[in-house]
């Protein structure tokens, strides 16, 4: 059972953002960059399958050299191999370009199953896993919170509004992982030491047979803004029962919210 | 611009978000001198065309087939792609619901076009521009489609109004070409969360609890208030990570990003990753013991007090108001 896990290197969720001087991008300051939280569920799932069935777990990312930090983290958790797809032509990669880069790389990395996080925090697109599956012509099941594998047959649970869909699929396929699927492990000291010795393969556009001209973003960025500050609110005072009465009155008469 | 809107139904009922998308589609078509159509898939769904016509669809492509009785991204992906080709769609609109987010990338990858997720604003003066939150709403990006290239959008529910804009809504039977063997990932069944209130992603009122809830047994008081208001129960990451409530309730950067009409934060301090997920709510009520809690900075109304005292009184007061109205 060989598993390919797609990860993304992202600023953690405590990051405060500012608009950069160019008015188009974000200044992330001294953000702490980490493995995308949802991708940790994907790495963990890959490792559990390997422990049960044998085979290898390969992690892959599209990003700059700094993204090796996230690859090392996944290697320290127990992944066997890592691939960094990095090229100046990939710098502005949107989900559609990212999926095509990953599809070109996946073609060189035969595997039975591809796992990704539900979405990458920051970009918040929730597209890449689905695009990748469609490009590769294999089934895609997204937002997965439960997974049972018997032979090549999969029973999956995926989250929908107010419930769960139970989906049957078979390998090979792409699965995007949601919180609840498992508890990601922390790397052990031994794992961290071993990860330092594992090799990270680097592929550029030419290695993947990709023409940079075809990787232009589908939408052109025009402006970046922060949300407008909310107007100052009203902190109520007095005895609690009176405050509650006033609150309900305000919600009804002033805010028209109830 | 020729705009095609995917209209989502479950159990034969159109989602309100789909009518919102239809209204956006109509506006986009009018602003660019084009036409708007819808595509609806299911079994026994032709009757839904009328509502879509009322919201601005000139044509409604209907795929009425047992193959579409249960949603699958394989069958729906093929059929919507086919409808886009038949109509010559230049813009393809979905709602950013569970189904829309699963389906849209399958279709756009099939068509080889770009997709913009979770759009919350559209400008049509002097060229078409789309606005969308990133970092769960910590920032907003404005983007333009590449001229002359078709594209897809998912639209965040509860943001765009449903408008009456009656058009013919002419039913066109969709020659979808889907066969049973196309469905590789099969939905076996849907398990509805038992006795649950609305999902936070769909609710117009959310009553949310954080670390101040102190334990899972206390969520009942939030459920009572949510039920009284026809809303949903939400939670902060702290409460979910403590195991008090399931992740499907989590609001924030690693949960759901919501913009309800009313968000009531109970015992939530307001970590930045939580604020990002809810601060575009229209009205925010904060109930917290700590007057310094960051949640008060985004609150429309705040009560500094013990939620275990405030929330039951709040429920009673809403009940009394409804009885009096």
Image (cartoon, coloured by chain):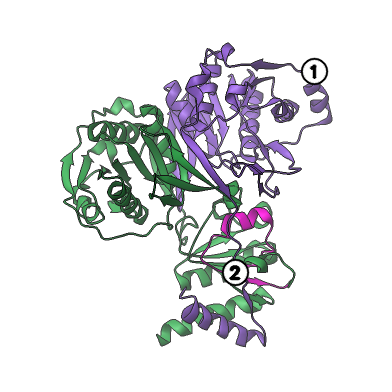
User: In this image, A216 relative to A187: left or right?
Assistant: left
> Callout 2: helix, strand or loop?
loop
Q: Which chain is green?
A: B
Residue A126 seen: no
Residue B111 place in picture, x, y as percent? 36, 28
**Which callout, 2 or 1, points to the residue nearer the camera?**
2
**In the image shown, does A226 or B168 lie closer to the viewer?**
A226
SS of the residue at dot 1? helix
Query: Is A21 displayed left or right of B88 in the figure?
Result: right
Q: Where is the N terminus of chain B found, in terms of image quarters?
A: top left
User: Is the C terminus of chain B in the top left, top right, bottom left or bottom right quadrant?
Assistant: bottom left
Residue identifier under label 1: A197
- Please check the rendered image and state whether residue A118 is part of the magenta-colored stretch, yes or no: no
Q: Is residue B251 above or below residue B102?
A: below
Q: Earlier in the sequence, mark 2 or mark 1?
A: 1
* Chain letter of the residue beneath label 2 in the structure image: A
Which of A186/B50 is in front? B50
Q: Which chain is purple?
A: A
Identified at 70% across, 49% down, the residue is A14
Give me the C-alpha separation between circle 2 and circle 1: 54 Å
Location of mark 2 (residue): A231
Q: Answer few, some or many: residues within 10 Å of disc 1's Cα (few below 14, many 20 plus, some between 14 and 19).
A: few
Q: Residue at x 71, y 30 (%)?
A: A70
């Amino acid at each position: 059972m060989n598993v390919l896990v797609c990860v993304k290197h992202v600023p953690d969720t405590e990051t405060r953002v500012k608009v950069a001087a160019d008015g188009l991008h974000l200044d992330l300051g001294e953000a702490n960059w980490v493995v995308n939280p949802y991708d940790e569920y994907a790495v963990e799932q890959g490792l559990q399958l390997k422990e049960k069935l044998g085979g290898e777990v390969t992690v892959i990312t599209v990003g700059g050299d700094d993204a090796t930090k996230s690859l090392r983290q996944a290697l320290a958790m127990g992944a066997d191999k890592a691939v960094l797809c990095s090229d100046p032509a990939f710098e502005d990669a949107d989900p559609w370009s990212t999926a095509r880069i990953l599809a070109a790389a996946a073609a060189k990395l035969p595997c039975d199953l591809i796992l990704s996080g539900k979405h990458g925090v920051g970009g918040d697109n929730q597209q890449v896993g689905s695009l990748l599956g469609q490009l590769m012509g294999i089934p895609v099941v997204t937002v997965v919170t439960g997974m049972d594998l018997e032979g090549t047959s999969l029973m999956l649970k995926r989250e929908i509004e107010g419930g769960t869909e139970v989906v049957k699929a078979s390998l090979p396929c792409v699965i995007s992982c949601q919180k609840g699927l498992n508890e990601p492990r922390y790397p052990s000291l031994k794992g961290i030491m071993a990860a330092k010795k594992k090799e990270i393969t680097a592929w550029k556009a030419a290695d993947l047979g990709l023409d940079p001209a075809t990787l232009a973003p589908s939408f052109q960025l025009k402006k970046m803004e922060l949300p407008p500050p909310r107007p100052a609110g009203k902190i109520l005072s007095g005895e609690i029962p009176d405050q509650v009465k006033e609150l309900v009155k305000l919600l009804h008469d002033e805010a028209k919210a109830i | 611009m020729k705009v095609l809107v995917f209209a989502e139904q479950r159990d034969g009922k159109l989602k309100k978000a789909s009518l919102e998308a239809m209204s956006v589609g109509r506006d986009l078509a009018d602003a660019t001198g084009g036409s708007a159509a819808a595509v609806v898939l299911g079994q026994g769904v032709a009757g839904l065309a009328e509502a879509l016509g009322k919201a601005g669809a000139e044509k409604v492509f209907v795929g009425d087939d047992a193959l579409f009785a249960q949603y699958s991204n394989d069958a729906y992906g093929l059929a919507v792609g086919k409808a886009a080709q038949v109509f010559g769609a230049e813009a393809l609109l979905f709602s950013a619901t569970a189904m829309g987010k699963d389906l849209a990338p399958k279709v756009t990858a099939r068509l080889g076009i770009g997709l913009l997720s979770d759009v919350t604003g559209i400008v049509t003066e002097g060229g078409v521009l789309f606005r969308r939150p990133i970092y769960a709403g910590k920032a907003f990006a404005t983007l333009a489609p590449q001229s002359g290239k078709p594209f897809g959008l998912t639209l965040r529910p509860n943001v765009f109004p449903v408008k009456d804009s009656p058009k013919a809504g002419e039913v066109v039977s969709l020659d979808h070409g889907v066969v049973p063997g196309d469905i590789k990932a099969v939905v076996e069944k849907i398990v509805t969360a038992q006795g649950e209130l609305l999902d936070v992603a769909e609710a117009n009122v959310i009553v949310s609890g954080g670390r101040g809830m102190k334990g899972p047994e206390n969520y009942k008081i939030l459920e009572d208030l949510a039920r009284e208001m026809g809303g949903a129960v939400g939670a902060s990451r702290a409460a979910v990570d403590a195991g008090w409530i399931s992740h499907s309730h989590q609001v924030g950067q690693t949960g759901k990003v919501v913009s309800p009409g009313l968000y009531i934060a109970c015992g939530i301090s307001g970590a930045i990753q939580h604020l990002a997920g809810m601060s575009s709510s229209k009205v925010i009520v904060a109930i917290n013991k700590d007057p310094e809690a960051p949640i008060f900075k985004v609150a429309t109304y705040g009560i500094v007090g013990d939620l275990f005292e405030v929330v039951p009184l709040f429920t009673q007061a809403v009940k009394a108001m409804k009885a009096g109205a």
